[in-house]
Amino acid sequence: MIETTNRSFPAIVKVIGVLIVAEAITFLLAALLHLGIQLPVGFSEHQIIPAAIVEGLCWLFLSLSLYAMFARQTWTWRAAVAAHIFAVVGVLLGIYATSRGPGDEANFIYHRVILVVLVIVLALLATPGARAALGRSNQVLR
C-alpha cells in the first residue's frame, strides 16, 4: 500500500495566500506608477520616488513571505507578520503624506482599502490555525 501525505494548505492559509498575492500586486503596480511608468490601468500617478521605494519594499517583503509560504519554510509566519507590519506602517505614512498635500480620490480610497486588507490578514495570521500551519504554533506572539 502506498501512503501519501496531504500537502495541501488549510483553508485559512489559502485565504491568507490569496490576499497576500493581491496585496503584493497592488504594491508593485503602485510602485511602478510612482516611478512614472505608464501602465494601462486607467489612471496615472505623479512621479514620487519615496512612495515608489516604500511600495517597492512592501511588494518585496510580501513576495518574500509568499515564497516562504509556498516553499513551506519554518520562518513563514514571522516573514508574513513582519511584511504586514512594515506594509501597515508604509500605508499609514502614505495616508499622512497624501493628507498633507493635494491628494486625489483614488489615493484616498486605495490607502484605506489596502490598510483594512493588511489588518485583516494580520488578524488571520494571529489565529491558532494560521500560526500552526505557518510554523508558529504554541509560541507566544513576540
Image (tube, helix red, strand yellow):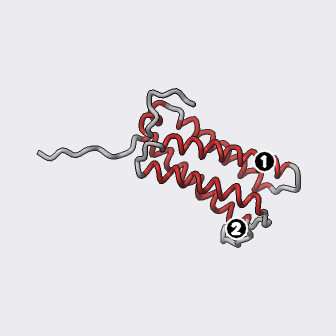
Disc 1: which residue? 95
Task: Name the residue located 75 percent from the left edge and 67 percent from the top edge.
Answer: 44
Quarter containing the N terminus: top left
Counting residues from the N terminus, which is met first, the one under dot 2 or under dot 1?
2
Task: Name the residue located 64 percent from the left edge and 53 percent from the top edge.
Answer: 58
Q: Which mark is residue 42?
A: 2
Q: Residue 17 in the image: state x and y as whole percent.
A: 49, 48
Q: Which mark is residue 65?
A: none
Q: Dot 1 surroundings within 10 Å: few (below 14), some, or many (20 or more)?
A: some
User: Which image quadrant for residue 52?
Assistant: bottom right
Secondary structure at numbered mark 2 = loop
Q: Is residue 99 left or right of residue 8?
A: right
Which is closer to the viewer, label 2 or label 1?
1
| Vertical arrangement, residue 52 with respect to residue 23, above or below | below
**What kind of residue is marked 2?**
Gly
Q: Residue 12 in the image: state x and y as whole percent.
A: 46, 40
Q: Dot 2 surroundings within 10 Å: few (below 14), some, or many (20 or more)?
A: few
Q: Residue 140 in the image: state x and y as whole percent.
A: 52, 27
**What kind of residue is marked 1?**
Ile
Secondary structure at numbered mark 1 = helix
The answer to whether the residues at label 2 and label 1 have Cβ atoms under 8 Å apart is no
Task: Name the residue located 71 percent from the left edge and 44 percent from the top edge.
Answer: 89
Q: Measure the C-alpha gap from mark 2 to mark 1.
A: 22 Å
| Vertical arrangement, residue 51 with respect to residue 89, above or below | below
